Amino acid sequence: MTGLIRGLHHVTAMSRDADANNRFFTRTLGLRRVKTTVNFDEPSVYHLYYGDEAGTPGSVMTYFPFPHIIRGRPGTGEVGETVFSVPEGSLQFWRDRLAAEGVEGLAAADRFGEKRLRFKAVDGDFFAIAEIANDPRAAWTGGAIAGDEAIRGFQGATLRLRDSGPTEALLKFMGYETVDTEKGIKRFALTGGNGADIIDIETLPNMPRGELGAGSVHHIAFAVETRADQLEMRKALIDAGHNVTPVIDRDYFLAIYFRTPGGVLFEIATNEPGFERDEDRAHLGEALKLPAQHEHLRAWLETHLPEIRDVP
């Protein structure tokens, strides 16, 4: 299936406090809130999207903030760390900024020759910022971070697995290639992707399985250009023995889902139609947008959803 997957599309995680989550990603990390909507299956809960100016696939971190959710337990069978790309020479800026914001878990690291800074978001979820040379993607500089140090999008993510073999085979089926191994971590890369091209696998055979909650990644989504590409990918996955959902319309992309052999929930999402289908680019994320089936709940939702105080 080489050539259909274009890299990551988005990563979706769980949170507890919508306002704190929004402040962290818009003010602390300087991303743009590109869509304010609700969970399709539980409309009393927001679905918040953060990314670059247009919410370009490969830049978008999304959250379901459930107010009473328990804290997740890190483990295997999940995304362990999501990594953002920043320009070379900018890590000191980020260290100073995150320290000033009181961000926890700050730690310098080096992986496959990349300098990176690891940290935790407000619910204890694990992130890193990596210096990536010559990343051509445009950063969102219309918010809290206006300089060249701004985040370009995802570099990739790390999967924590007890047994990596079947997932390695799946990634190769999806077009990824093994490019390096270091300290028990195996790196897979996509050639000619959208910039969010890296998946690292950390094998931890003695670590318990993670438990979903605040701070956990719910799923990781991979991008395809079109609906036709998605249908081709779905057929190939089913033919290969994977249990794949029907195509689901998520308003801003079409989605299919399947559970990987290692336990991680994968999504394959289309780049079309994008976040500008119901808002112009200048005002993305400002209004509450509802799926058509939940529009009748608008009056109730506008008074019962938690307040998000920061302007995106």
Image (spheres, rainbow, N blue to C red):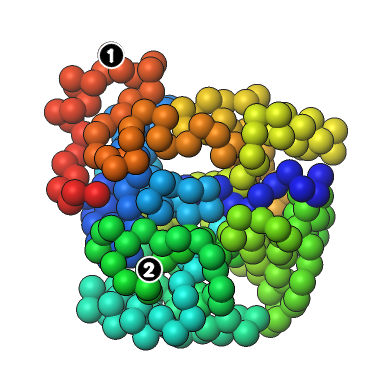
Residue 44 x/y as whole percent: 29, 30
Question: At x 64% / y 39%, what residue is drawn?
Answer: 225
According to the image, label 2 marks what residue? 150
The image shows residue 168, relative to residue 227, as above or below, that is below
> Local crowd at mark 1 within 10 Å, few (<14), some, or many (≥20)?
few
Which of 218 and 92 lies nearest the eye of the viewer?
A: 92
- Quick check: 178 left or right of 208? right
x, y (%) of residue 273? 51, 32
Query: Which quarter of the rendered picture does the N terminus lie within?
Result: top right
Residue drawn at (33%, 32%) of the image: 279
Residue type, numbered disc 1 = His
The numbered mark, 2 or 1, whose residue comes first in the sequence reads 2
For the residue labelled by badge 2, is the local secondary structure a helix, a strand or a loop? loop
Element under disc 1: helix
State the separation of the CA atoms marked 2 and 1. Answer: 39 Å
Q: Which residue was labeled with disc 1?
A: 296
